[in-house]
Amino acid sequence: MFKNRKVSEMIKKKSFVKEETKEVQDPENKDNKEVEEPAEQSPGGETPETAPEGDIVTGDEQKTESTDKVSTPDNSYEEKLAEMQDRYLRLSAEFDNYRKRTLREKMELTKYASESILMKLLPFMDDFERALNNSANAKDCNAVKEGIDLIHTKFVDFLKQNGVTEVEALNCAFNFDLHDAVGKVQVEDENMKGKIVDVVLKGYFLQDKVIRHSKVIVGE
């Protein structure tokens, strides 16, 4: 009987030790569970909706994508092309008019270039006509000669005023640039050999240009 009591006490001790060990190894569920933090709420009290996995697309980006996809008709290039064509046609017409006007002016200038010089020569024609009319009834030949000399002097002055001067030839050395030899004659004076002894037709300068060579006879 004593043994039975002792065995029962040992069993009780073992069960008590097991319960303490269980309490140490298995704490209460409320202590063992992780405390779940409350989800963040929006200022209005509503929780924000989570976007699906991937990049977040905002409203502005969606509008931009939709605008790029929609192609609007653009006629700016056609308008510029039409404007350039119109400008080209206008410039071409203006240039053609300018070319025709310039050509007409050149033709008129060439046709009437001598008008001014001829107007200045007309008074000499009047002088010669008067001289001829008076010479028919004139009894004094010296008066007619003096009149012709005056006309000649007046005409020479007119030529000088317009840059026309006579080429010196008589008794000058022959020069191929100024004179044309139309003949040669034998001369007794040694100093006259190679020089001009007679002028058949006078030559003239216009400024520094020879407009007519003198026709001369050279001594040899």
Image: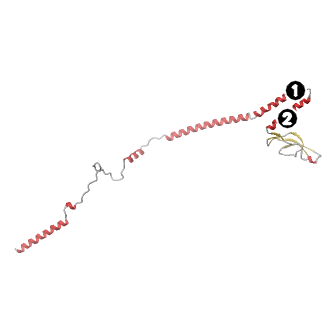
Numbered disc total: 2
Point out residue 170 in the picture as x, y percentages from the top left corner: 88, 42
- Image point 89% across, 26% down: which residue? 136
Residue type beneath disc 2: Thr
Q: Amino acid at mark 1?
A: Asn
Give whichever of discs 2 and 1 has the lower sequence position: 1
Seen in the picture, residue 19 relative to 180 is either above or below; the reply is: below
**Left/right of residue 18 with respect to residue 195 in the rendered view:** left
Choose top left, top right, bottom left or bottom right for residue 197.
top right
Name the side, left or right, on which 61 lies relative to 148.
left
Q: Residue at x 9, y 71 (%)?
A: 9
Residue at screen point 66% across, 35% down? 101
Q: CA distance from mark 2 to mark 1?
A: 19 Å
Residue 106 sits in quarter? top right
User: Which residue is situated farthest in the bottom direction here?
Assistant: 3
SS category of the residue bearing label 2: helix
Q: Residue at x 6, y 74 (%)?
A: 3
Numbered disc in front, either 2 or 1: 2
Q: Which residue is mark 1?
A: 134
Does residue 37 lie above or below 81 as drawn?
below
Mark 1: few/some/many CA within 10 Å (<14, 14-19, 20+): some
Specify the farthest residue to the top: 137
Residue 119 vertical placement versus 45 (above, below)? above
Q: Position of residue 162 (x, y in %)?
A: 79, 37
Q: Identify the residue position indicated by label 2 in the image.
A: 153
Q: Residue furthest right?
A: 188
